[in-house]
Amino acid sequence: MTRLEERFGDPYDADNPFGHRAILDADERSAVAEGAEAVLDEFGLNAEFVPEALGGRLVEVDELVRRLRPVFRRDASLGLGYGVTSLMAGLNVWLGGSDVQRKWLADLLLGGGKASVGYHELDRGNDLTNNEFAATRTEDGLVLDGRKEVINNAARADAAVLFARTGGKGGGRDHSLLLVDLRQLDGETFRRLPRYRTLGLRGVGLSGFEFTGCAVPDSALVGDLGQGGDIALRSFQVSRCVMAGTGLGILDAGLFGVLRFALERRLYGQTVAELPHARATLAGAYADLLTADALVTTATRALHVLPATASAYAAATKLLVPTLLEEAMNALSVVLGARFYLREGDYAGFGKHMRDLPPLGIGHAGGISCQLILLPQLSRLLRALGDPAPAAVFTAGAALPELDLTRLRLFAPSGDSLLAELAAHGTHPGIAAALAKLTADVAALPARDTGVAASPAALDLTDRYAALLAAASVTGYARHNAVPDGWAELALSRLAERLTPSAALPATHPAAEGALFADLLDRATTGSGFCLDRDPVHRMLAQ
């Protein structure tokens, strides 16, 4: 992590080949800065996506998120385009593939190759159960027909994991996953589709695949026939947490840029940073960044410690964290003012970060799909909270059990041990009231309102659940780790306001905001990142 930061250098150095100027010039060409991928090759970033048992460096998921942060803090297109899709593809194989498939894909990635994952078809969005891309069994193997679209790295991937219809009974076992060596396919029956142009993440090569009677061997099947949905949904539990975590680097970078501007820009005889509204906005964005980090950290550690409940925690994290980050960036754009719109100059990097953040939140599974994962589980989760989660879920650096993907489940058991943290150790009165109301509202929810036809009021329950999980993460993290003064107080207050919106002006917390702003300034001055772990960064405030 530190090595990548050093190699990337100060983003505000105009002569830095990996600084904002070079990144923005490349973004105008829908590319990434020249030489940036070579830096990731030198670092061996693909090894982060491969389990240690197969020769890689993937051991703890929270550590993976931290190691990706310097890349996304610099350029989300670089991070996503280089290889996070290889992780998404790999998770399916690490979970459901044969020993031969695992070794083959691990060797491919460790050798610098790239893998894509093909879930999406544009006409069907996140409705994977209605995908029409088909794999038909023959005496000689499988024959592929159809298209996969808006696929990252499709133009240069060596391999792909494809979600394909293999049955037509209308049940949950109509789809399977295939691991396909794209280099071996017949050019007459397989082609790579043209690239899509995008508003954000311009440097990411999104295109697709088209198959017309394309033959692949039976050995391409990952797991058993009809197991594709089960494997994909369990692998999503890891990738949802990781994708939410990548956005932390974007807000970290955006917050630094706006702080830098606020400290040098003078209005009304003082710096912008001295204006109460600007200072409160900076402190609030910082509080939300730390809150999002606490939720991501808790959810990623729960993959190891509480794998049976991880489906709910991962979906809630992917639902709330992108929203927190986008709202914080929107608030910061007001402080930056007209410069937010500029595509050149010292602060044009903020606009790029802001364009890149929303598509990361959509990712391979948007908010509504996360809500539909959560909704049918709420009654069991809230029926009886049980014992609080083990300290290892919250304690940074505490030893974790080995990541065992086979222990992940599609439906959580009764009793939410993270929410039990709120009941056992006390919390903001607004949070306690919101937990009691959610429990009552979920108990009254009719079963018919827990599926795809759920009402807006029913879906709102999932938003409230995610905010309460964030409160539990803040409470638990603050109990077990050293945290910035004022953060827990301000974070819980902001979450309480989210849970119970009011027509009145939100309460002010000048002492907490002042303490957080002082910590933010200290970190910016001493070369520390803005996330909970205070990782070293290479960037300078304006002189």
Image: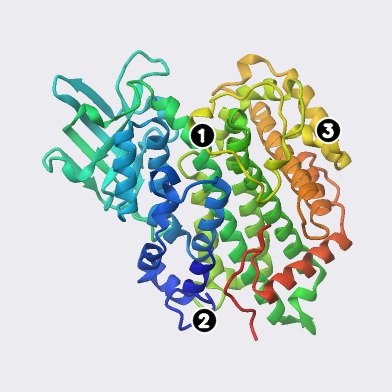
Q: In the structure shown, which secondary structural element does the residue marked by tag 3 occupy?
A: helix
Q: CA distance from mark 1 to mark 2?
A: 43 Å
Residue holding disc 1: 404
Q: Nearer the viewer, mark 3 or mark 2?
A: 3
Other-residue count near label 2 (Cα within 10 Å), few / some / many at <14 / 14–19 / ≥20: some
Helix or strand or loop: what does disc 2 sit on? loop
Instruction: Tell me the mark number nearer the camera, choosing from 1 and 2.
Output: 1
Apparent side of residue 251 relative to residue 263 in the rendered image (left or right) = left
Q: Identify the residue at image location x=64%, y=22%.
A: 413
| Amino acid bearing label 1 | Asp
Which of 22 and 94 lies nearest the eye of the viewer? 94
Looking at the image, residue 430 lies above or below residue 263: above
Q: Which mark is residue 13?
A: 2
Q: Is residue 137 above or below residue 283?
A: above
Residue at the extreme top of the image, as rendered: 169
Residue 321 vs residue 282: left or right?
left
Question: How dense is the environment of label 3, judged by Cα within 10 Å: few (below 14), some, or many (20 and up)?
Answer: some
Q: Looking at numbered disc 2 in the image, what kind of residue is underneath it?
A: Asp
Precedes in sequence: disc 3 or disc 2: 2
Q: Earlier in the sequence, mark 1 or mark 2?
A: 2
> Tag 3: residue type?
Ala
Front position in the image: 155 or 392: 392
Q: Secondary structure beneath disc 1?
A: loop
Number of marks in picture: 3
- Residue 423: give its label: 3
Q: Nearer the viewer, residue 100 or 83?
A: 100
As drawn, 347 above or below 226: below
On the image, the x and y values in percent for residue 458 come to 66, 26
4 displayed left or right of 214: right
